[in-house]
Image: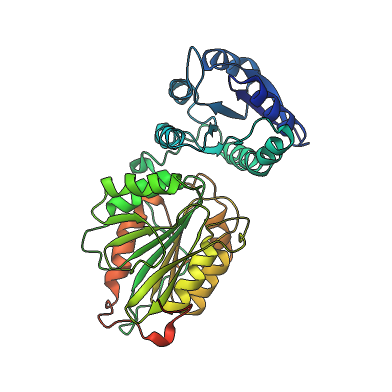
Amino acid sequence: MSRIRVLVIDDAVVIRKILSDAISADPELEVVATAANGRIGLQKIPQVNPDVITLDFEMPEMDGLETLRHIRKDYPKLPVIMFSTLTERGADATFEALALGANDYVTKPANVGSVTNSREAVEKDLIRKIKALSLKAKSLEAGQRNISLRAPELLPQTVRPALRPTSNTQKHIDVLTIGVSTGGPNALAFLIPKLPEDLGIPVLIVQHMPPMFTRLLAERLNSQSKLNVVEASDGMTVTPGTVYIAPGDYHLEVFQSSKGVRTKLQQGPPENSCRPAVDVLFRSVAAVYGGNILGVILTGMGSDGLRGCELIKENGGVVFAQDKESSVVWGMPGYVAEAGLADLILPLEAIPQEIVRQKNLFRTRSAPISSSASIGSDK
């Protein structure tokens, strides 16, 4: 089996060295070339035919965003992973890159002076993303059009059902909860603005992202949406019509208090190597809302959310999974679908309307949730 070919584009010699050593140490990968700026990188693409590109933002002659525009024009299917910094400027640039068609991003090691620590950080995050995105690229059949989450109107129109939920006049949807990872910012940028102002239920989201990135994600979605979108803080009252996004590096839970359902943030151990973790949120939501839940698993690597969806289904709730064709990586939704937990498997463009239809299919609860369903302590 041939190794995955990686082109590294970064103006920093130290970073190129760290990336090259970390990538080449994996027997499934090889660095076929490096480039000190985007102009040189573009020249090398046809020469070395990479499977994946890692791309820095700030470079002389041609920066990362301009390079990305050229790559997307000439090589629309070539996976690109941006190499971002953990700063507000870096986060802003990352969101712009994702909107331009970057497949994913990793954050640069904070201390490049420690080569060992920097390499370990790269190996932990970057390597698995290279493998996941290259497999996505290699699985596309020759001649198949590129799928872009920025252009959902190009996605398949057919809704592919798995297990249809059974109508039950006694049932109600009281909360929408969403788990997402790789490809999530673009998926959420399509989905959340499509939800109506009168949705009538709260929305709780775990998007695998570091601190600061989740705040900017909430701000961007809030500016585009009819619903109120916030980064969750500890002790917020969960209200209909508001979208709560788990902050980076904190698990988000909910619990029942005498004043209603409230949020709880905690920094317990990562689950599925993630904090925030989808399973943590879904577990607490199932404990509070019982079966009156609509859970949605969108594009992302790994299996985070699988156990949480099992709990939702055990309690009688409804689960949707994004389909393979419209997912950047069909990991999280794939695990849920293959486990038989998805009531519907849907292309991204069909999910907002199906959320509304499913919510309206049942009565919405008007009475507050019983305090007997609580977890955690009252505040």
Q: Name the side, left or right, on which 369 lies relative to 148.
A: left
**Residue reaching furthest to the left:** 198
Q: Position of residue 246 (x, y in %)?
A: 44, 57
Q: Is residue 257 above or below residue 46?
A: below
Q: Name the side, left or right, on which 271 lies relative to 293.
A: right
Q: Is residue 234 above or below residue 40?
A: below
Q: Is residue 159 above or below residue 311?
A: above
Residue 291 in view of the camera: no
Q: Position of residue 4 (x, y in %)?
A: 69, 32
* Nearer-the-camera pick, 90 or 31: 90
> On the rendered image, what quadrant is the C terminus found in?
bottom left
Locate residue 332: give its quadrant. Answer: bottom right
Q: Position of residue 142 (x, y in %)?
A: 55, 33
> On the rendered image, what quadrant is the N terminus found in?
top right
Residue at the image point whose x is 35% and y is 78% from the top = 167
Q: Position of residue 82 (x, y in %)?
A: 53, 32
Residue at the image point whose x is 67% and y is 39% from the top = 127
**Total number of numbered discs in the rendering:** 0
Residue at the image point whose x is 32% and y is 78% from the top = 259
